[in-house]
Image: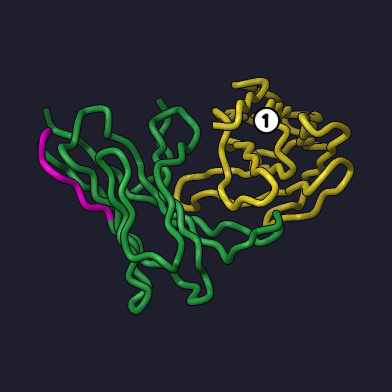
Amino acid sequence: GESVGLHLPTLSVQEGDNSIINCAYSNSASDYFIWYKQESGKGPQFIIDIRSNMDKRQGQRVTVLLNKTVKHLSLQIAATQPGDSAVYFCAETQAPSYGNNRLAFGKGNQVVVIP
Amino acid sequence: DAGITQSPRHKVTETGTPVTLRCHQTENHRYMYWYRQDPGHGLRLIHYSYGVKDTDKGEVSDGYSVSRSKTEDFLLTLESATSSQTSVYFCATMGQGTDTQYFGPGTRLTVL
């Protein structure tokens, strides 16, 4: 498959361990955040989102934490599996989007799961 | 996901030729987007549409045009392809009243 980016920060994690992926965002007016997962050769896949009126949101094996004070977002993956190997990137916007309030994307973090 | 398909999935073409990429969605989403993804740059917005026949430019629109004659189809045209347009192109859609964009599988375009 093709690489989605060169020289991306890489997180190597042992299968079964927890992963934490970080994202710093730049726009203090942003109030809606999304995490995407992109496997090699595929399109970005929505994982989880969070709005600024929340600090934490949980999904299936994933948790997103939002710290508005320092403009920081993190994605935690519990019990990492080989299928979690991918590039993960965050996106931010100021809602409501109305289509023209664009998503700003981070460049991504490569997660490599070691069996 | 929003039932998004892109065609073709891979294309090799020569400099100066016209190229049209198609995005088709089945979810009746109002908003549609075209992005390109290049190493070191992440996803960059080319053009977007906020309804049939309603389109606007993104941050890297030079050399590209779009058309949306039906809700379900959004076409991206490179009038005269250049090597700098070699990239992976993604279509995305978003429903009205939501803020989440969903992506298609991508088209890998190589301009020789």
Q: Colour of chain B?
A: yellow
Q: Residues within 10 Å of mark 1 (few under 14, many from 20)?
A: some
A85 left or right of B59 in image: left
Asked whether A105 falls inside the magenta stretch, the response is no
Where residue B97 sits: x, y (%)?
A: 66, 51
Which element carries disc 1, helix, strand or loop? loop
Q: Which residues are magenta?
A: A15-21
Between B85 and A61, the one nearer to me in the picture = A61
Where residue A49 sits: x, y (%)?
A: 43, 51
Residue B111's place in the image compared with A111, above or below, is: above
Where residue A26 sits: x, y (%)?
A: 46, 72
Colour green maps to chain: A
Q: Amino acid at mark 1?
A: Glu
Tell me where residue A112 sits by quadrant: top left
> What is the image's colouring?
by chain
Residue in the image at 66% along x and 62% along y? A101
